[in-house]
Amino acid sequence: EAKAAGRNTYRFFCPSMQEVLDQMAMLENDLRHALVRRELRLHYQPIVRADGSLAGVEALMRWQHPQRGMVYPAAFIGQAEKAGLIVEFGQWALTTACEQLAAWAGDAQTAHLTIAVNVSARQFRQPDFAQCVLDILERTGANPRRLKLELTESMLLTDVDTLITRMAMLKETGLGFSLDDFGTGYSSLSYLKKLPLDQLKIDRSFVQDMLQTPHAWSIVQTIVNLARGLGLDVVAEGVETSEQWAALRRLGCAGFQGYLFGKPMPLEELRMGVTLAAPGHSEDSEP
Ligand code: C2E
Ligand code: MG
Ligand code: MG
Ligand code: MG
């Protein structure tokens, strides 16, 4: 059968290769239209304080594909980066989040909430990035103090002086910067000291393992102490159990995000006023 396939023999040995490539080409073509077809969505995931009260949310992008249904970032953000679409997508996310902030500002129950928006390295590297953010803030009327931009350590691969200048300029508006997935990337401690950051987010992988493996525990503890020493807020990502939450609180962590408090969800499902049961109670009520 392989011989009969002639020049395409390799397809016999590796039947999925072409399929994968075709799929990717199709997806990329669809991706190019996602924005004008209004298929992008923001889901919001709660970020809570030590007492369980809602401090804010992280905005996470989803793609509502007409045939495939809800597509998650792992399946399209990388491709959007490669195709250069991430710049427009990112601007859309920032605009949508800022419109939400402006809408929340009028209600005492929501006015204090922050929204964190992920910014890709490619987006941040655009020469007009800072101006774009300023324009969006002005156009939407969002309070910059309620906005956090989440950067990743991959930003540090580019010129750090430019990065710092750009951050400093944006910080003048009052917005904050958070370093996402901290501990998994390239940052050296000397950068941490130089960058005008407000927050570190402890990567989910460390939180997941912290109660099982002493190494992960000690990494989490070190990040919390490092943040405190540098005067930065710290948020733990991927908190799934009340045991993890309790342990993190004991270490002095003050912000928490994870399935324990809520998955990323459409705006309508977000319950603003909710304070989770006081720490002691929530542990007692575990099955
Ligand atoms: P991230 O910024 O680190 O976001 C946190 C990810 O962890 C989200 O995945 C969230 O759903 C997931 N997560 C939160 N809590 C838990 C938990 O308790 N358990 C588990 N297993 N997972 C949890 P998501 O939404 O699939 O996003 C993945 C990544 O895609 C994000 O990681 C971020 O790097 C990127 N991303 C999402 N939205 C945007 C965007 O608007 N722009 C850019 N440039 N990147 C985005
Ligand atoms: Mg993030
Ligand atoms: Mg993260
Ligand atoms: Mg992460």
Image (cartoon, rainbow, N blue to C red):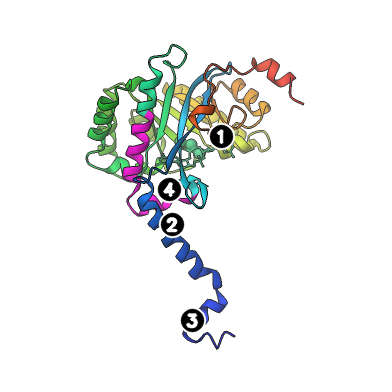
Mark 4 Cβ and ligand 1 under 8 Å apart: yes
- Going by the numbered disc 4, the residue's amino acid type is Ile
Please rate how many residues cluster around mark 2, counting C-alpha atoms within 10 Å: few if below 14, some from 14 to 19, many from 20. some
Q: Earlier in the sequence, mark 1 or mark 3?
A: 3
Q: Earlier in the sequence, mark 2 or mark 3?
A: 3
Q: Earlier in the sequence, mark 1 or mark 2?
A: 2
- Going by the numbered disc 3, the residue's amino acid type is Asn
Residue 91, percent from left and from top: 32, 38
Query: Which marked residue is nearer to the observer: mark 1 or mark 2?
Result: 2
Q: Which element type, helix, strand or loop, lies under badge 2?
A: helix
Q: Residue at x 70, y 16 (%)?
A: 281
Image: 219 above or below 110: below
**Real-space CA distance between mark 4 and mark 3, rounded to the nearest whole angstrom:** 32 Å
Q: Residue at x 47, y 85 (%)?
A: 7
Q: Which label is found at residue 77?
A: 4
Q: Which element type, helix, strand or loop, lies under badge 3?
A: helix
Q: Residue at x 24, y 30 (%)?
A: 135
Image: 12 above or below 151: below
**Real-space CA distance between mark 4 and mark 2, rounded to the nearest whole angstrom:** 11 Å
Query: Which marked residue is nearer to the observer: mark 1 or mark 3?
Result: 3
Q: Earlier in the sequence, mark 4 or mark 3?
A: 3
Which residue is tagged 3? Answer: 8
Camera-side residue: 285 or 168?
285
Which residue is tagged 2? Answer: 27
Which residue is tagged 1? Answer: 219
User: Magenta part of the protein: which range?
Assistant: 75-97
Query: Which marked residue is nearer to the observer: mark 2 or mark 3?
Result: 2
